[in-house]
Image: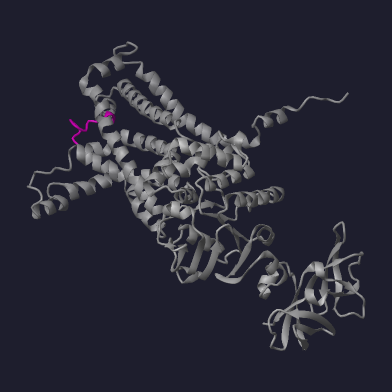
Amino acid sequence: MASLSSFKTLRLDGVGRDFGTMNALKDLTLEVRRGEFIALLGPSGCGKSTALNCIAGLLPTTRGSIYLDDRRIDTLPTEDRGFGMVFQNYALFPHMTVRANIGFGLKMRGVPKAEAEPRVEQAIRTVRLETQAHKLPGQLSGGQQQRVAIARAIAVDPPLVLMDEPLSNLDAKLRLEMRQEIRRIHQSLGCITIYVTHDQDEALSLADRIVVLRDGMIRQVGTPEDLYARPEHLDVAEFMGFRNRITGRVTSRDGDRVSLAVGGTTLDGTMRHDVAGETAVAAIRPDDLVPVAADAHGIDAVVEAIEYRGRDFFGSARASGGEELFFRADRRVNPGEAIRLGAEASAVLVYPGE
Amino acid sequence: MADASIPLRTRLAAKGLDGVTLLALPAALFLIALFIYPFGYGLWLSFRPKDGSLFGNYVKFFSDPFLYETIGTTLKLALPVTLMNLLFAVPVAFRVRLMKNQRLLTTILVLPITLGTVLVAEGMLNYFGPQGWFIRTLVTFGIAEPGQIKLVNNYWGVFISLVITGFPFTFLLTLSYVTGIDPALEQAAATLGARAAARFRTIYLPLLAPGLAITFCLSFVQAYSVLPSAVLLGAPAGPTRVISIAAYQAAFEQYDRPMASAIAMIMGFVQLAVVVAALSMRNLFYRGPAAGAKG
């Protein structure tokens, strides 16, 4: 075990998993350094939970191998891997007190009581549950149960903590609180955390690096800043909040600048990849798309709905080409009003058309 | 001044009595007519023995070894059978839980329930009888001498028949308890370093125990009231003279209904004692929902 806690990297090498004829996970290759917080991000069915279960040993891999430094671990049964895991539904043992739940891992590892007790108390303090330690999980709120699940996973001092959408069952306010808590706990442990989520906000705010998965394949790996500003593919862009996608015809190229003809108007953008074909798709965040002067470059649209957000307005409009657009406005525009919507060329990402 | 009192109907509804309560009426009538009244009548009848005393029947029962020994005889059959069914059912249920063709296997396992005890007895007499396939096969392969193994018309005949007819029932109940436990609990235990045996001991067993106690009670009560197979497959004059045979003889051979009632009451009391013992053990265990989280 001593060799495990002093490891430096986790390496996934071409890990794949099939369910019958379906490839749930294809060729997942990734190297994670000690201390990193990795988010596996993707829509449901993208293979992110499958990947996590393969690392945990709850699912056997069909292909590939997993290493901690030079030690191959994908051939070990779950109980010998020594990873901490936080389940989506917490999976607390309902018949054991909070303290017994948290102490379970140490007990199973045969840690002597005298040594285990202070470690359990430490874990209870870490998740701030001192006053609840004698209760059964059923007597706790969702957020408290979540903390127990985290404490149980970290009490054994694992080299790797795996979290499977741990916040999805909590309400919005608690989710924000727990997010900070998880980040704090991760930093205090210095282990690797692999965190599965479908919520890009969660991934952006928690992770050191984000792995975006789709259809069982890695689409992009990068820092949150990277992913947010420079999504590699259109589907990653959509996942990162580029809700508006407009198809147009390429009219001119200059370096990475490109102009698209959309309906009867022109939209300027930045190429993410070399757009070779005639058609291209522009992706724009609602916050970057604003009403512009009638003679500026942009898209003509008719306002459909508008809502006041406090600082500004958030609206939806129908473009002349039929696409639904979401935009931000500093002043109130009215439903039915014809406006031109535009954005800075750097905020318009252009991808090859389908 | 406005009437501040709350209408009776609202007050009753607050205590859970409203129109819907009436839906329980047919079941209540049914229970009274077919259970409570006959039970009360039987109890009353058992204290009206032919000799005119109050406890005559009970005194007679407990002073005649031919009668009181039926309690032990029946327990000797019912307890091991029930425990054995339970011990079988748990591993089978654990395996079936993971199977894809669960329904097919469940159907096969449950088939004996639909056959009825008499048909099972008939089949067993043919199959396990002295000239049946089973014994003949054993003899052919030299595993047993003719007449060495006897599987019907004795204790084992009744035992096997009770296992065959009781197992599906025990199994179905057990399966529902086993599948009611969130598999994530076992996975969580595995990630925490618990091996299979430890996972069963620390997670499954404590969570299953209350359900297994209920299953034990229901299976036991069924086995304890055995009659047809004890007569057809057992030795009803000796080793399998179970308590229901004694009751049957009192009622329909000696036409002593009060005595039969007394035996039935004693039978009921023994069953109750075992059930209470099993259920009070249940209280030693956790009895909440067997899931890892709320809702």
- Indicate left or right for A301 with A22 as reference: right
Res A42 seen here: no
A226 or A144, which lies in front? A226
**Residue stretch rendered in magenta on the structure:** B233-244
**Residue A285 on the magenta segment:** no
Please give the name of the residue rendered at 37% of the width and 19% of the height, measured from the top-left corner.
B45
Q: Is residue B247 left or right of residue B139?
A: right
Chief secondary structure of the magenta span? loop
Q: Please name the residue shown 56% across and 48% down the image.
A: A90
- Of B86 and B63, nearer the camera is B86
Question: At x 44% / y 44%, what residue is drawn?
Answer: B177
Where residue A270 sits in the image (x, y, percent)?
76, 79
- Quarter of the image for the N terminus of chain B: give it: top right
* Number of residue marks: 0
Protein image colouring: one colour
Residue B238 within the magenta-colored segment of the rendering:
yes
Across and down, in percent, residue A319 comes to 82, 76
In this rendering, would B63 be left or right of A240?
A: left
Q: Position of residue A339 (x, y in %)?
A: 89, 74
Residue B68 in the figure: left or right of residue A340: left
Whether residue A318 can be seen here: yes
- When the figure is inspected, residue B229 is found, relative to residue A324, above or below; the finding is above
Residue B185: horizontal and vertical position, in percent? 48, 48
Figure check: A318 above or below A162: below
